[in-house]
Image (spheres, rainbow, N blue to C red):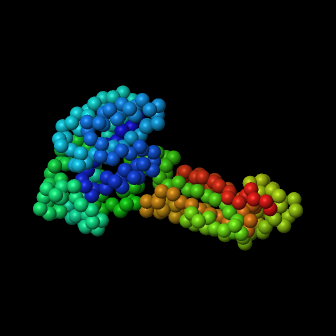
């Protein structure tokens, strides 16, 4: 079992970090008091693998004293079959102040101080012992949302979560409308249509005779090569900017032949690049 304590300064990026980690399989609990962490860890350990990766957000709002937190950390690190680490997120004071002014949220220490600047300074001093005990410290001052996500995926993500982005490739028929969730749509109606070949009409793009026919033309091969180059270039950029999922639609007239064959080939290629890839053929089962 893996337990990650996410702590740090208010405005340092804890919520965003928790959201990104949730995308790669962490079970997130926000603002759990230190007194409850150990019991919760024991509960998770008995969950039969359901809670194999847990991230607990801990900040100044739940802290009367850090001694209990440090005691819990030592006990968690001593547990068998448990890897426990603490991540601390911080940012420069002017960056934190700017973030609070942009979001118009209230700093948790604002009521006990005379200004936002004083609240930020007070929390930095208060949280210094926690930072010193952290296993990992990330300064988010110059990190965009996408860059923070990449940083966390580099530390906590596996090879199967390359870029942390899931790609869904779907074929469809234009006559039935565009898929509303599509981020990218490619129209393959320029390709020769197997529909007009009697022996191919009632087959689909997943059948070898149809695929052989579709890819038997130079324009299809050229198109697929250019599309692969485009995606090899753009997919890492989408992931870097923080996109967690990408929906690619490939359409032909009825969604039976050309779009199915091309979508299937495209999904195999994207999967070979290391991305989580799902393949779906929306209109393939409709009557011809």
Picture residue at 40% right of the left edge, 34% below the top:
44
Residue farthest toward the bottom in the current orientation of the protein: 190
- Residue 253, percent from left and from top: 73, 68
State which quadrant residue 181 falls in. Answer: bottom right
Q: Is residue 159 above or below residue 209?
A: above
Q: Is residue 159 above or below residue 234?
A: above
Question: Is 191 on the left-hand or right-hand side of 42?
Answer: right
- Residue 221, percent from left and from top: 70, 64
Q: How many marks?
A: 0
Quick one: quadrant of the N terminus?
top left
Quick one: quadrant of the C terminus?
bottom right
Picture residue at 18% right of the left edge, 37% below the top:
67
Q: Nearest the camera: 264 or 96?
A: 96
Residue farthest toward the top in the current orientation of the protein: 80
- Residue 284, percent from left and from top: 73, 58
Picture residue at 83% right of the left edge, 58% below the top:
202
Residue farthest toward the right in the current orientation of the protein: 198
State which quadrant residue 150 falls in. Answer: bottom left
Question: Is 217 on the left-hand or right-hand side of 14?
Answer: right
Residue 205 appears anywhere in the view: no
Residue farthest toward the front in the current orientation of the protein: 111
Q: Nearest the camera: 187 or 177?
A: 177
- Residue 200, percent from left and from top: 83, 59
Picture residue at 44% right of the left edge, 32% below the top:
47
Q: Nearest the camera: 65 or 90?
A: 65
Residue 160 appears anywhere in the view: yes
Question: Is 96 on the left-hand or right-hand side of 204?
Answer: left
State which quadrant residue 80 falls in. Answer: top left
């Amino acid at each position: 079992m893996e337990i990650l304590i996410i702590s740090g300064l208010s405005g340092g990026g804890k919520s965003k970090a928790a959201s990104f980690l949730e995308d790669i399989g962490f079970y997130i609990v926000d603002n759990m008091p230190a007194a409850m962490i150990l019991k919760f860890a024991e509960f998770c350990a008995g969950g039969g693998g359901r809670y194999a990766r847990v991230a607990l957000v801990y900040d100044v709002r739940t802290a009367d004293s850090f001694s209990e937190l440090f005691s819990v950390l030592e006990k968690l690190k001593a547990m068998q079959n448990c890897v426990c680490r603490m991540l601390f997120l911080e940012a420069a004071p002017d960056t934190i102040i700017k973030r609070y002014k942009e979001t118009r949220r209230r700093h948790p220490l604002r009521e006990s101080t005379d200004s936002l600047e004083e609240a930020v300074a007070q929390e930095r001093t208060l949280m210094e012992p926690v930072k010193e005990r952290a296993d990992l410290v990330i300064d988010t001052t110059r990190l965009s949302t996408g860059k923070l996500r990449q940083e966390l995926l580099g530390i906590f993500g596996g090879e199967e979560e390359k870029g942390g982005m899931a790609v869904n490739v779907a074929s469809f028929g234009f006559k039935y409308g565009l898929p509303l969730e599509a981020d990218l749509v490619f129209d393959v109606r320029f390709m020769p249509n197997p529909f007009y070949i009697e022996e191919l009409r009632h087959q689909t793009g997943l059948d070898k005779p149809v695929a052989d026919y579709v890819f038997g033309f130079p324009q299809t091969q050229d198109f697929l090569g250019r599309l692969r180059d485009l995606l090899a270039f753009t997919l890492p950029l989408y992931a870097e900017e923080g996109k967690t999922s990408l929906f690619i639609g490939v359409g032909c007239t009825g969604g039976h032949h050309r779009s199915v064959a091309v979508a299937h080939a495209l999904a195999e290629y994207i999967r070979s690049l290391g991305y989580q890839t799902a393949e779906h053929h929306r209109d393939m089962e409709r009557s011809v």
